[in-house]
């Protein structure tokens, strides 16, 4: 089981705009085997979960370890996860979050929680953040060695750097 990938998918889920089934299917573009299982009930379940999960990223962003851990534990209690050993490749046994998920929403929630719970245990509770670009409110997972990530994407980082450069140029011209 690649917990970092699951944690990054959790961030992508929080950032996703999911007004309807079509948007959810688009969010799952790289997981075509799930498309046929998407149902109308998945969308409201995931939208509710996005709000709950965003609070975990917000707590981590302000270094509130107790709130991160407490929130994740509450979510794990609300959405029990059933990890299972996968044997689809007998030479490479590994963990999957669940083979018993009754819905796409349940599967995505389980992956998100297992990924984030393991990331918090392995790397620390302050590895989740909210983009520092003022016009963006996306969340991200920081797996950098020195925990230095501040932006959700290269685009936001570039946008912030250009804005700072222009502000310095304007200040220098005014002086």
Image: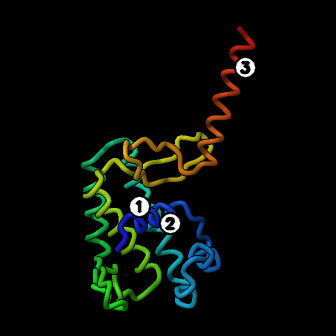
x, y percent for residue 38: 54, 85
| Mark 2 residue element | helix
Residue that label 1 marks: 53
Which label is found at residue 121? none
Q: Earlier in the sequence, mark 1 or mark 2?
A: 2
| CB atoms of marks 1 and 2 within 8 Å | yes
Residue that label 2 marks: 13
How packed mark 3 is, by other alpha carbons closer than 10 Å (few <14, some 14-19, many 20 or more), is: few
**Residue plotted at (37% across, 50% down):** 127
36 shown above or below 62:
below
- Determine which quarter of the picture holds residue 158: top right
| CB atoms of marks 3 and 1 within 8 Å | no
**Residue plotted at (41% across, 68% down):** 6
Spatial separation of the CA atoms under disc 3 and disc 2: 38 Å
Which label is found at residue 170? 3
x, y percent for residue 27: 58, 72
x, y percent for residue 42: 50, 80
x, y percent for residue 1: 34, 74
How packed mark 1 is, by other alpha carbons closer than 10 Å (few <14, some 14-19, many 20 or more), is: many
Spatial separation of the CA atoms under disc 3 and disc 1: 40 Å
| Residue 97 horizontal side relative to residue 37, left or right | left
How packed mark 2 is, by other alpha carbons closer than 10 Å (few <14, some 14-19, many 20 or more), is: many
The outermost residue toward the top is: 175
**Residue plotted at (60% across, 79% down):** 25
Between 65 and 45, the one lying in front of the other is 65
- Determine which quarter of the picture holds residue 75: bottom left
């Amino acid at each position: 089981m690649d917990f970092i990938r699951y944690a990054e998918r959790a961030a992508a889920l929080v950032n996703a705009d999911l007004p309807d089934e079509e948007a959810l299917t688009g969010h799952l573009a790289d997981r075509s085997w799930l498309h046929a299982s998407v149902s109308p009930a998945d969308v409201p379940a995931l939208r509710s979960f996005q709000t709950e999960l965003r609070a975990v990223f917000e707590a981590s962003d302000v270094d509130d370890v107790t709130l991160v851990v407490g929130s994740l534990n509450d979510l794990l209690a609300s959405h029990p996860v059933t990890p299972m050993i996968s044997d689809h490749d007998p030479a490479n046994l590994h963990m999957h979050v669940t083979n018993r998920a009754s819905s796409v929403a349940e599967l995505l929630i389980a992956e998100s929680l297992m990924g984030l719970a393991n990331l918090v245990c392995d790397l620390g509770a302050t590895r989740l953040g909210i983009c520092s670009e003022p016009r963006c409110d996306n969340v991200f997972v920081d797996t950098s060695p020195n925990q230095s990530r501040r932006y959700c994407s290269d685009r936001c980082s570039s946008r912030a750097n250009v804005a700072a450069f222009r502000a310095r140029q304007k200040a220098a011209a005014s002086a």
